[in-house]
Image (cartoon, rainbow, N blue to C red):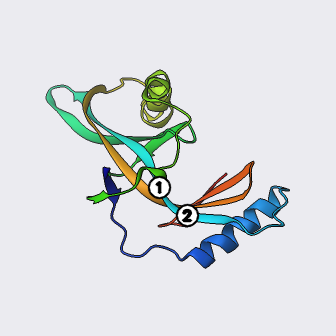
Amino acid sequence: MKIKVALNKKLIGQERAERTASKRARRKGRSISSQPTVALCYKRLYFNKLLGLAARPPFQPKKINYTLFYDPVMGQGGLTDCIPAYEEREVDESQIVRERYTLDDYEMQKDNIIEKNILRSYLLKRPELKYIGREEVYLPYWVFTYAPDVQILVNAATGRINI
């Protein structure tokens, strides 16, 4: 299966990711007596580009580009600077992290994400938002499975953790 994988010059090593994951699991009160199974997997993120047109009569409207992201594994979204650079890569389907949420869930949350991240900074006149397009980009993650019910994802580029 060909997917768009975010380009990262240097990924964190498996040992460092495992230390980080085990510390977080202990802090959360989870028992991790056994050795985890480890895999480098890819998690899909949706990036939506929006163009904001802020009216400034008698001048031309100010154009502001926004990029929203949505994580279908965690069911959360927000605002980011840009879509990460990516390359197309052949990946086995078993390396893709299973999603809990769908695009329909995102469509239901999209207005709330826009309100919380973009429109809250405009008190009087809000900009008109135009949808430009959507990109799907996969980010590399180390997946540690300690027991049948304990799975920890560590971002292979930044070291941030998702439980």
Q: Tell me the element at label 2.
A: strand
Dot 1: few (<14), some (14–19), or many (≥20) neighbours within 10 Å? some
In the displayed structure image, the side of residue 40 where residue 92 appears, left or right: left
**Is residue 145 shown above or below 131?**
below
What residue is at 67 percent from the left and 70 percent from the top? 20
* Whether residue 85 is visible: no
At which x and y percent is residue 104? 45, 23
At which x and y percent is residue 60? 14, 32
What residue is at 47 percent from the left and 55 percent from the top? 95
Dot 2: few (<14), some (14–19), or many (≥20) neighbours within 10 Å? some
In the displayed structure image, the side of residue 130 where residue 163 appears, left or right: right
Return the residue at label 2.
Answer: 39
Kind of residue indicated by mark 1: Gln
Return the residue at label 1.
Answer: 95
**Labels 1 & 2 near each other (Cβ < 8 A):** yes
Residue 6 or residue 2, whichever sits in front: 2
Q: How much space separates mark 1 and mark 2, taking CA atoms?
A: 8 Å
Kind of residue indicated by mark 2: Ala
At which x and y percent is residue 86? 29, 58
Instruction: Specify which label sits upstream in the sequence, 1 or 2.
Output: 2
**Is residue 115 shown above or below 68?**
above
